Image (tube, rainbow, N blue to C red):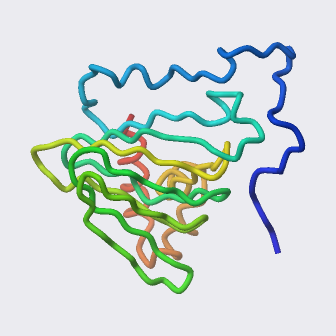
Amino acid sequence: MAMAGDPDIISDFLLPANGTVDANFFTYTGFRVLVGGYPPSAFKVLKATLAEFPALNGQSVSYAVLEFPSSTTNPPHTHPRSAELLFLIDGTLEVGFIDTKNNLFTQTLQAGDLFVFPKGLVHFQYNADAQNPALAVSAFGSANAGTVSLPNTLFTTGIEDNVLAISFKTDVATIQKLKAGLASKP
């Protein structure tokens, strides 16, 4: 059996490589751009993970702010090292996940709702509102939850077209159209 997660530490926190710690080490300012900012024109994720905020090393926590302009989606993806607890601050979102028995669980969230996506399961979020944006904050039980985007993983990593066509019970031309569509997105 394979397990993935953050190791337990035996100290209050882990020192950075330079060994210098003051209050600045424990402060992340990357979300300040949200204050007074305008909604983005495309789905956007701002992260505070181990990569952006080294003080999280060994703490088994991280955050992401998800900004959804109207009619945008966070495509199906997984987090192999953590569950995700999503708090909807503003707007509405259609959310869902698929369990290991291929059961689909969906919900329409309103501002103030929380939804948990179990660790490692495929899930998505969609702002179906054609007029209004949505804003959510996700908390993770890992400083590095990891994200595996299914569209990118399947169609931009070089898996042979024949393999994908057989797997999806379609033809190579359809797979190539899907790949071309992803290649044209920012």
For the point 40% across and 46% down, the residue is 182
What is the tally of numbered marks visible in this picture? 0
Image quadrant occupied by the N terminus: bottom right
Rendered view: 38 above or below 181:
above
Q: Residue furthest left?
A: 131
Looking at the image, residue 14 lies above or below residue 112 = above
State the image coordinates of residue 122 (x, y, percent, origin top left).
Answer: 50, 66
Residue located 25% across and 65% down the image: 108
Instruction: Please report the residue visible at 38 percent of the width from the left and 76 percent of the height from the top.
Output: 105
Q: Quadrant of residue 57?
A: top right
The one nearer the camera, 152 or 54, is: 54
Residue 36 lies left or right of residue 8; in this view the side is left
Q: Residue at x 33, y 39 (%)?
A: 67
Q: Seen from this angle, which residue lies furthest bottom?
A: 101
Q: In the image, 153: left or right of 23?
A: left
Depth check: give the residue in front, 103 or 158: 103
Residue 116's spot in the image, x, y percent?
47, 63
The answer to whether 38 is drawn above or below residue 174 in the figure is: above
Residue 20 x/y as whole percent: 82, 13
* Quarter containing the C terminus: top left
Residue 138: image location, x then y, percent:
46, 48
